[in-house]
Image (cartoon, helix red, strand yellow):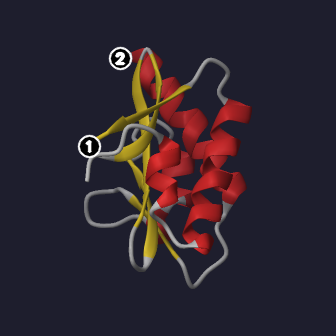
Amino acid sequence: MAFASHEEYFARLSPDPRRLLQSIQARVEALVPGASRCIRYNMPAFKHGRVFLYFAAFKNHIGIYPPVTQDAPLAQELAPYRNEKGNLSFPHSQPLPIELIGRVALALSRECKRK
């Protein structure tokens, strides 16, 4: 199924993952003025000129893409959540660190503007 909007993607989720993705969406929109919603690779994403953040719900975790590469202290702080490719995986079994995810969104937005 191809999704046309964040809302269509969220509608297919059960309540708990939906709530988590909605909180990520709200945090990004509050912190990154001018960011607009889009769907890329059939996942909710945000762009500011170009796409800077993707996020999605999976069976056991919430994923955030791409990896932070230009903020070494933040990348170090994210180490417990990074997979082998550097992408972030937040297990459903743990509270979602929304403040940390907000900092990731800001860092990725800045990285995108530098490219």
Q: In x, y percent, where is residue 89?
A: 43, 67
Looking at the rendered structure, the secondary structure element under dot 2 is loop
Q: CA distance from mark 1 to mark 2?
A: 21 Å
Name the residue nearer the viewer: 77 or 105.
Answer: 105
Please give the residue where the numbered disc 1 appears in the rendered image: 41
Identify the residue at image location x=57%, y=56%. 21
Residue at left offset 46%, top offset 48%: 8
- Tell which circle, 1 or 2, labels the residue nearer the N-terminal end: 1
- Which residue appears at 56% of the width and 49% of the height? 74
Q: Give residue 60's mark.
A: none
| Position of residue 78 measured from the top left corner of the image (x, y, whole percent) | 52, 60
Residue 35 in view of the camera = yes
With 26 as the anchor, is 43 left or right in this view? left
Please tell me which residue lies in front, 57 or 111: 57
Q: Would you name the residue on which mark 2 appears?
A: 115
Residue 40, placed above or below residue 48: below
Q: Nearer the viewer, residue 51 or 82?
A: 51
Residue farthest to the bottom, as pictured: 93
1 and 2 marks in contact (CB < 8 Å): no
Residue 66 visible in the shown view:
no
94 left or right, relative to 71: right
Residue 48 point in image, percent of width and height:
49, 19
Q: Secondary structure at mark 1?
A: loop
- Amino acid identity at mark 1: Tyr
User: Which of the image's four quarters has the C terminus?
Assistant: top left
Question: Which residue shows up at 36% across the image and 56% down it?
Answer: 87
Q: Amino acid at mark 2?
A: Lys
Front residue of 100/27: it is 27
